[in-house]
Amino acid sequence: MPEPLSAQPLTLSETLNSLPMGYMVIDLEGQVLEANNHVAALLGLSVANLVGLDVASFWPDSAPELLKVAKSGRQAAGLILPEISGCWLLTNPLAGGRPGLAITVFDQRLWHPLMGPTPLDPLTPYYKKIFESSSDGISICDAQARLILVNRASAEHLGVTPEQIQGRHVSFLVQHRLLDNTVCLDVLKAKKPVTKLIKHFKTNKQVLLTGNPIFSPDGEVHLVVINERDLTGMMELQSDFNRQSEQLDRLKDQLATIELAELAANDIVAVSPSMRLLLDSALKLARYGVREVLLTGESGTGKGLIAKFLHANSKNSKEPFIHLNCAALPETLLETELFGYDKGVFTGAAPKGRAGLIEAAGRGAVFLDEIGEMPLSIQAKLLTFLDNHEFRRVGGRAVMTSPCAVIAATNRNLEDLVAEKLFRQDLYYRLNVFGLHIPPLRERPEDTLELARREIADLNRRYDQSLTLDPLAVKVLQGHTFPGNVRELLNCLHQAALLSSDRQVGPFLKTLFESRRRSEPPDASPASATAKTASRPAEGGPPALSTELDRAERTLLEETVKACRSTREMAVRLGISQAGVSRRLKKHNLLPPTRNGGSGRSARRRRQNPPKP
């Protein structure tokens, strides 16, 4: 008895033809291995004629993509079939790891009664091309966090091809160090959009990822669409902008230094690199609000101008700037001038007392010129003030405060004075935290001519003249060492303006400098030349007042040394401090008296020839 028809197994051909959609199988070269009647009918061929054909012969546009999918061995859902209007493909790898690709063809016209009357979107055939043409990276993950679709830009961000990651779980990208994080899992968990800045290791890119959920009718996340924006170029531009901003700030600081130097150019000339560096340092100290500065340099280099420059460029420039020469006042008067005094301290004092310069300066600055001449007793009180800005008036008990800045200046070597016990070591280190050394004029020849030009222009305006710096004047000025520095230069030009018989000052300056060199010893140092320049009388005139005062002071000291037994006794007799006596003895190269009496010279002879036992 024959077996019933229903019990007979279906052949592969019968099974494929029973499917309600087109179906075919191709190998890795694109040759059709199997096909059913539906797909053959769509192509207008019979199954026998279709099998064995190359897929590119009837689907030329879709063939390259189908071959890529076949060789990748991964699923690619929703491929549009542009060769046949209203059709799309679903591809799957063959079971058992066999090489090839199973292609299911869905005909919109056959499914139209089930899908409703909505016509096919006219953009449907172009969605794939639109997806690939985006310059931003776009990837789509399913509810299990698998990458089901990746466009070219997204793959380029990672440094791979779409086929290498399509179908992979997103954790694969992190595990293989393609990126340091992902947004897909966060979107699936939070069920809302998530944005992160992600580092792509292979391409060294910074990419901004924004994941947006697409929900199914039951409210669950069905897909996650991830948009990727490469920020590497933008961040590099930001970095370049920051570098340029920093460079611009540095240029602004340099320009501000130059501009401020130009504002002070009526008094300060800074053409030489050393002076520009000095003004730049002074400007920084002023801007940072440094309250104690020590200015050092030879006499006549312009320490007072630098002190004014410091104050003028500080945040308290509107406050008072008070100048006090420590060498111009005796000890008792210097202390009261600096710290003030209470009422009734001495006869003739103001009934209510008087504020000192430190108190009067307020938030301004006190400029202590010739700080090396300050007596030791006042140095101790100044040190206390610098430490805590507290002081007492002379004769007073109340502790007062003043926030004023202290700018000190000296032309003496304070280290030598410290070694000679004429200057407190602790005060020296307290003042010298921020020290500025003003170079002498001979070390900055560029400034000499600029100073001369400005002074000549000023003298021409003052005396209504037309003096010029002729080539001889330039040569003479460049060849002179100027032991008296800026003060000597300006004085020489002033003499030339009033005494020269020619509008060109070169001949007069040459004669003046030659006469000075002839009157100096050959081995005269700049320091000794400075002292001699300051004390020398004018050519053909009476002795200078400073010379007569020095001579009288030396004579008085010699007589006092003979009459006294110690510098303390000399200080009482002369009415000055003991430190003042020591400084003046050293100035005139005199030895102090001894306890046994007699002059310094006899004391020296006794030390050199001690009595025999």
Image (cartoon, grey):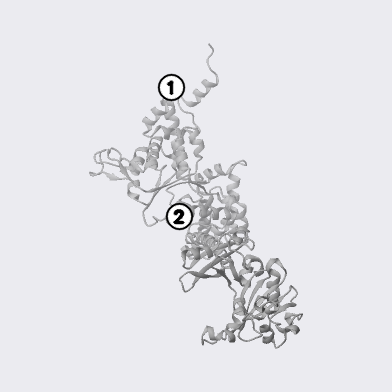
Instruction: Examine the rendered structure and indicate whether residue 47 appears above or below residue 354.
Output: below
Residue hosting label 2: 287
Q: Is residue 523 visible?
A: yes
Disc 2 on helix, strand or loop? helix
Q: Amino acid at mark 1?
A: Arg
Marks 2 and 1, how far apart at CA: 54 Å
Using residue 178 as the reference point, say whether residue 119 is left or right of it: left
In front of the other: 459 or 378 = 378
Q: Classify 10 Å Cα crowding around label 2: few (below 14), some (14-19), many (20 and above).
A: some
From the top left corner, tell me how far across and down residue 502 is, in percent: 56, 62
Residue hosting label 1: 595
Instruction: Examine the rendered structure and indicate whether residue 476 appears above or below residue 83.
Output: above
Using residue 69 as the reference point, say whether residue 446 is left or right of it: left
Q: Point out the frontmost of discs 2 and 1.
A: 2
Q: Classify 10 Å Cα crowding around label 1: few (below 14), some (14-19), many (20 and above).
A: few
Disc 1 on helix, strand or loop? loop
Q: Residue at x 55, y 53 (%)?
A: 277
Of callouts 2 and 1, which one flags the residue occurring earlier in the amino acid sequence?
2
Using residue 42 as the reference point, say whether residue 189 is left or right of it: left
From the top left corner, tell me how far across and down residue 231 is, in percent: 56, 67
Q: Amino acid at mark 2?
A: Arg
